Amino acid sequence: MSGLRVWAPRAGAVELECAGRRRAMVAEQDGWWSAGAATPAPGVDYAFLLDGEGPLPDPRSPCQPAGVHGPSRAVDHAAFPWVHRAFRAPPLAGAVIYELHVGTFSPGGTFDSAIQYLDRLVDLGVTHVELMPVAEFPGTRGWGYDGVDLYAAHHAYGGPDGLKRLVDACHGRGLAVLLDVVYNHLGPSGNYLARYGPYFTDRHRTPWGDAVNYDDAGSDEVRRFVVDNALMWLRDYRIDGLRLDAVHAIYDSSATHVLEELQMEVDALSAREQRPLVLIAESDLNDPRLVRAREAGGYGLAAQWSDDFHHAVHALLTGERQGYYEDFGRMADLAAALERAFVYAGRRSAHRGRRHGRTPIGIPAQRFVAFAHNHDQIGNRAQGDRLSHLAGTRRAMIAAALVLTSPFVPLLFQGEEWGASTPFLYFTDHDDPDLARAVSEGRRREFAAFAWAPEDVPDPQAEETFQRSRLDWSEREREPHRELLDWHRRLIALRRRAPWPTDGRFPCVRFDEAARWLVAERGDVAIACNLGAARRAIDVAGRSRLLLASDEAAVLRDGAVELPPDSVAICAPEGDGWR
């Protein structure tokens, strides 16, 4: 490391503590302080004292070997021996994304132990691995959304070199890597940023308190802190893209929104390094400006998650109507999600009590990410139930077909492909007993909207809650898991050889609300679903070839597919394109 500096405009004096000695740092312009020749060498621990108080970790700490309250450790990112530098990520439009949580994905729960299972993702047909947040967070187990040292890869997972080994191993197998990052808030435990400078502002409020300061006094350096963080993951860890958590909670009234600024900087890095880099947003605003081109007044992000698609599929297949699911549950909602990504595109939402969203006119379908599961929609349930737990294997197969034949970029959550019996629960490891109690109690209050009894909510702080969430890879070889895994493989193989997944066009959808059937036409292919209680013949407009069916009793004849209850079939015309 060279030229160690820290932004601390609130301090009258800053000292560097390193190798048992304290040295005064030199004040520079605009609140910056420099260590000069006292800069620690790679592998050496250090910390700062502000006006004699501390020691505190570096806000830009590259490594926290003792956790969020310990000293920082200097890292030379250029020293890592990359093997697969020539790797270039495949286009996002043709991607199949696999979201995983490092701590529960493998028995070892580390970056290195995850490598042992990558070949199984390749065999499945995955193209992109998406890691839930790995920036340093409190304790040894957690989801990662309460990170506080945004520049440090989590020590319990294997630290900086462990993450680099995982990324390099993915690239060696042809897998791109996406990383979930959190720029809308920081966790409460170990968060020392406010002691350094105005990283937060009461100008806006979020569910976590004061907002990150993107538009108040001192915000220039805060914006630079976040943008530099994103560039670090992409440059120093050779990660291929970032998923931006809950951008609706990023408040910025500046003329150039921080997301637009971030996209411009990522584009510049991509050009310099000659490799594709993408940004994907999570947002519940249903606002197409996120992915609209900058020259057309948007922010220019590569894609955004479509929660409406998930909600439409989930409510229809499970019958749940609690909480935000009260806005969904009709065949018409699923049809709207398939035809334009957003179900709520200016119409009134009963759950919100107002109109919501905007129609994404002119936006190609591959700018949206679709899923039947993700960490939130499973983990934010009292028992961490998966769709296969709630609706059974037959309906899980329908959900998989809807996701993997959709015009959107499909995303699978770890274990979804075989209907894992393990739940994915919410778990934490806070060392502050008051904070731990507040998290546990708050979790129970949140579930009141879904009418889940408090006693049914596992304690997030209990290690058992974490251990129950680990995947059991051995069950993939047993039924009904093996059947569901094979179904996912066949759907992904079909998606890869089909001519339409990357054409950007939305399907034409027909449905019958009372009879509970739906047909989505994608080019020359028709995807027919029967959610009714009786066997039904569904018109597929003369298509005479059955490509895939979730039930062997499905029959295609006379231009219609006869489907048993709770089944799906994919039909095409005869021709050389479907050998």
Image (cartoon, rainbow, N blue to C red):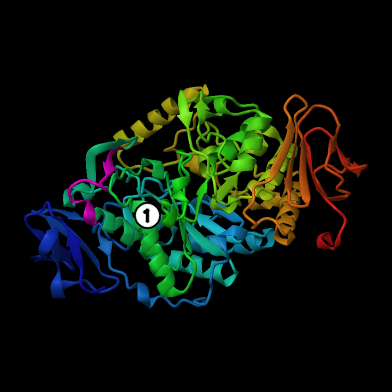
> Observer-nearest residue: 13 or 548?
548
* Residue in the image at 63% along x and 32% along y: 333
Going by the numbered disc 1, the residue's amino acid type is Glu
Farthest residue to the left: give it.
12
The residue at the point 62 percent across, 54 percent down is: 504
The residue lying toward the viewer, choosing from 378 and 113, is 378
Answer whether residue 364 is magenta in the image.
no
Which residue is tagged 1? 260
| Residue drawn 58% across the image and 53% down it | 366
Quadrant the C terminus occupies: bottom right
Query: Is 373 on the left or on the right of 462, as rendered?
Result: right
Q: Is 217 part of what is drawn in magenta?
A: yes
In the figure, is residue 515 to the left or right of 193? Answer: right
**Quadrant housing residue 517:** top right
Relative to 62, say whether 356 is above or below. above
Quarter-of-image position of residue 285:
top left
Question: Residue 179 at x, y = what percent?
Answer: 46, 57
Is residue 313 visible in the rendered image? The answer is no
Q: Nearer the viewer, residue 42 or 204?
A: 204
Q: Position of residue 544 (x, y in %)?
A: 89, 49
**Total residue callouts:** 1
Q: Which residues are magenta?
A: 209-221
**Seen from this angle, which residue lies furthest right?**
558
Q: Residues within 10 Å of mark 1 (few under 14, many from 20)?
A: some
Residue depicted at x 29% and y 50%: 255
- Give the image location of residue 469, x and y in percent: 54, 43
Whole-percent x and y of residue 206?
32, 36
Using residue 189 as the reference point, say whether residue 3 is left or right of it: left
For the N terminus, the quadrant is bottom left
